[in-house]
């Protein structure tokens, strides 16, 4: 399973709890779409997950210490799936679609809005995992992705293990 998170907005630790904490512990890969807010939070994720199973991009609220250790965008390959990661603060819908096309991505993962959801921008599927720790006016959430033979099964889940949305993406593999 792949877990996608975003917008932790912490000061000291990863702020994982409930199903989100369990999912991160079970995951083969954890992707974070930025806004850790401090290097301590970034370090807490890296320590929890392990640097071999953790990848991230920075967000508009991340300090230079985090930006120096990440990138603004990243393409991740895992078991035949290509994920394109961005925080999203500098991306319009058109820019995200183009980013996904250029990356030949099966799924674009983006944060920033704190609003969990799945949509298609033209042919490009886009998932926003929301924020597990600082949801603001939305439900707290993360994304869980399961790779099947010809599909990527996704679900947006709250820390209380409530399923907010499910989606399926066909991919070439």
Image: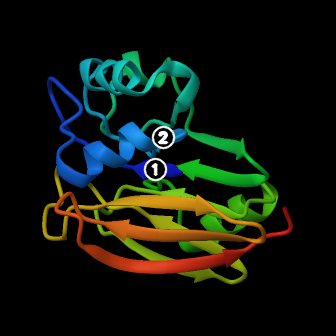
Q: Is 34 or 50 nearer to us in this picture?
A: 50
**From the viewer's perspective, is residue 152 above or below residue 90?**
below
Q: Which mark is residue 52?
A: none
Is residue 34 at least partly visible in the picture?
no
Q: Mark 2 highlights which residue?
A: 30
Q: Mark 1 highlights which residue?
A: 3
**In which quadrant is the C terminus drawn?**
bottom right
**From the viewer's perspective, is residue 57 above or below residue 20?**
above
Q: Secondary structure under badge 1? A: strand
Rendering coords of residue 85 (x, y %): 57, 49
Classify mark 2: residues with Cα within 10 Å, few (<14), some (14-19) or many (20+). many
Q: Secondary structure under badge 2? A: strand
> Along the horizontal axis of the image, is 67 left or right of 136?
right
Of mark 1 and mark 2, the one earlier in the sequence is: 1
> Along the horizontal axis of the image, is 147 left or right of 36?
right
Query: Residue placed at 69% from the left, 44% from the top?
Result: 75
Query: Residue placed at 30% from the left, 45% from the top?
Result: 22
**From the viewer's perspective, is residue 36 above or below residue 161?**
above
Rendering coords of residue 57 (x, y %): 50, 37
Is residue 66 at least partly visible in the picture?
yes
Q: Is 90 or 140 nearer to us in this picture?
A: 140
Rendering coords of residue 170 (x, y %): 74, 76
> Along the horizontal axis of the image, is 113 left or right of 82?
left
Query: Residue placed at 53% from the left, 58% from the top?
Result: 109
Are the residues tagged 1 and 2 within 8 Å (C-beta)?
yes
Give me the C-alpha separation between circle 1 and circle 2.
Answer: 5 Å
> Along the horizontal axis of the image, is 61 left or right of 117?
left
Residue 37 placement: quadrant: top left
Residue 25 placement: quadrant: top left
Query: Residue placed at 16% from the left, 62% from the top?
Result: 160
Rendering coords of residue 12 (x, y %): 15, 23
Residue 126 placement: quadrant: bottom right
């Amino acid at each position: 399973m792949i877990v996608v998170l975003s917008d932790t907005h912490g000061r000291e630790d990863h702020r994982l709890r409930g199903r989100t904490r369990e999912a991160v512990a079970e995951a083969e890969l954890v992707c974070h779409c930025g806004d850790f807010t401090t290097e301590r939070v970034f370090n807490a994720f890296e320590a929890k997950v392990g640097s071999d199973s953790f990848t991230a991009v920075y967000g508009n609220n991340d300090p230079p210490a985090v930006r120096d250790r990440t990138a603004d965008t990243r393409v991740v390959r895992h078991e035949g799936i290509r994920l394109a990661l961005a925080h999203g603060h500098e991306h319009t819908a058109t820019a995200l679609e183009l980013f996904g096309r250029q990356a030949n991505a099966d799924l674009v993962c983006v944060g920033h809005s704190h609003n969990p959801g799945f949509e298609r921008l033209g042919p490009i599927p886009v998932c926003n995992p929301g924020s597990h720790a600082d949801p603001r006016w939305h439900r707290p959430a993360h994304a869980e992705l399961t790779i099947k033979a010809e599909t990527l099964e996704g679900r947006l889940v709250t820390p209380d293990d409530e399923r907010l949305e499910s989606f399926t993406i066909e991919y070439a593999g």
